[in-house]
Image (tube, helix red, strand yellow):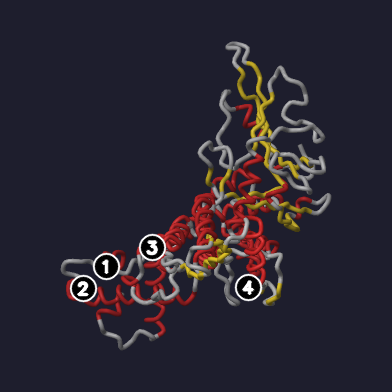
Amino acid sequence: MELFGFEINRKKREAEQKSAPSFVAPINDDGAQVIESSPMGSNFAGGQYLSSYIDMEGAIKSEIDLIQRYRSMSLIPECDAAVDDIVQEAIATNDLDNTVSINLDRIDSNNLSDGIKDSVRKEFEHMLTLLRFRNTGPDLFRKWYIDGRAYFHLLTEKGSPKKGIVGLRYIDPMKIKKIREIHKKKDEKTGVEVIDRIEEYYHFSDAGFDKTGTNNSGQVLKISPDAVIMASSGMMDATRTQVIGYLHKALKAGNQLRMMEDALVIYRIARAPERRIFYIDVGNLPKVKAEQYLADTMTRYKNKLVYNADTGEIRDDRRHMSMLEDFWLPRREGGRGTEITTLPGGQNLGEIEDILYFQKKLYKALNVPISRLEADAQFSLGRASEITRDEVKFSRFVDKLRHKFSVLFLDLLKTQLVLKGTMSAEEFDKVREFITFDFQKDSHFVEMKEAEIYRERVNTLREMDEFVGKYYSQNWVRKNILRQSEDEIEVIDQEIEKDKESGDGEGDDDSFDQY
């Protein structure tokens, strides 16, 4: 299948045929819609034709609905502030260094030569250029974080796929869906239906899919899986049938906070002002005339001024009834005559503990430290002991997000290297787990923390200086106190020898300098 794309996994079908037969499909955490085609069914089973209708009720419906809920949730001010904290922490940009760089130090030279490593680094820089990651990296990460997935269409030069990827187009997750079609056959010996092959592709509709799983235009494109790159959150729902976003567990807390705030506004408007009760003496008038007299009195003394909150104008408008209306009650002859009584307003309007509770609950659901919610909270850049446990957990959570987001870089890099013939798909899969990405961090914070770490190590080394050579070896001190690796020790020793030969190290007799 090579429609609107290119096929790079030529041996996939052969590998499937060599594998042992099974009646269970492999589990994938990509949220693809699974379609099974029976060997006794027709050729239309599983949506073989683009014009056929596919019942995606249950998967597409809930997925589209979830994405809409995530985007609506991100517009809540508290949620928006939390997402901004996460994005700024994950993707730090500056004018000097790259936002992210590839690290190939864990790959042995026997598996990947230095020349190929240089080619991999060059192609990775090309991918960052196509993504415009230096300028749009935070926006792209924000979209991925909110939606829980990100799709890109790979563009190649027509007739020359070996030139590699020449362009990337972002695809709205509302307009695309991955389909996994499972073809089964009946085993001749047991009579059980086993999996013959698995076909994967994407369905794309420019009009988008609605909540029912259908599209408005009725036109769906079938796209090759190699022409689309997908990066998901890696989280699945309880049924493990669809991908959920990182805002999923904050949906309830966000809705509760929004309802509590609305209820608070309504309560304050309704209960805050003082109201008056007018007792109007109607004497011995009949009921009808008494009601008419009461209505005339209300019209005569009623406040007809209405305040428009949108324009800031005050106008006389009798058509508007507000919640601040006074009460008018008739009183018969023999009573105390006309009387005006004032009702007190609400007494507990300043209590917002419930609002603060749900704000903290929302921040906990988003894994953001609650201290960042407080306006008067100060974040210290000093000693490590001053950093709270929540900040440490938040830093680890951000590292996890970076790792999940890096799947986008790996898949792009794999496709690019395979198309250009630098590496085969099998060779890339062997070294894939050893490729890491170094994201730029807050330079000031990192500088302060690294300086403190080095200072503490040096102070510990000074205190242990008299015990070196007696109870501890120099090699042990360098590995356990200074935290130097074998490669670092080798490089440092070579640099020390060069300094001695050039004379830069002469005159320094302190034992501390030998480290």
* Amino acid at dot 2: Met
Element type where label 4 sits in the image: helix
Q: Locate the C terminus by quadrant.
A: bottom left
**Label 4, on which residue?**
301
Q: Earlier in the sequence, mark 2 or mark 1?
A: 2
In the drawing, does residue 213 fall left or right of residue 75?
right
Residue 325 x %, y %:
59, 65
Residue at 49% across, 60% down: 105
Tag in front: 1 or 3: 3
Find the distance from the CA under tag 2 to the CA under tag 4: 90 Å
Q: Earlier in the sequence, mark 1 or mark 3?
A: 3
Tag in front: 2 or 4: 4
Find the distance from the CA under tag 2 to the CA under tag 1: 9 Å
Residue at 39% across, 75% down: 380
Tell me the number on the disc at residue 464: 2
Query: Foreground residue, 501 or 433?
Result: 433
**Label 3, on which residue?**
390
In the drawing, does residue 157 fall left or right of residue 171?
right
In the drawing, does residue 223 fall left or right of residue 381?
right
In the drawing, does residue 158 fall left or right of residue 92?
right
Tell me the number on the disc at residue 477: 1
Find the distance from the CA under tag 4 to the CA under tag 3: 60 Å
* Amino acid at dot 4: Tyr
Q: Are marks 2 and 1 in contact (CB under 8 Å)?
A: yes
Q: Residues within 10 Å of mark 1 (few under 14, many from 20)?
A: some
Residue at 37% across, 63% down: 485
* Amino acid at dot 3: Asp
Q: Locate the N terminus by quadrant.
A: top right
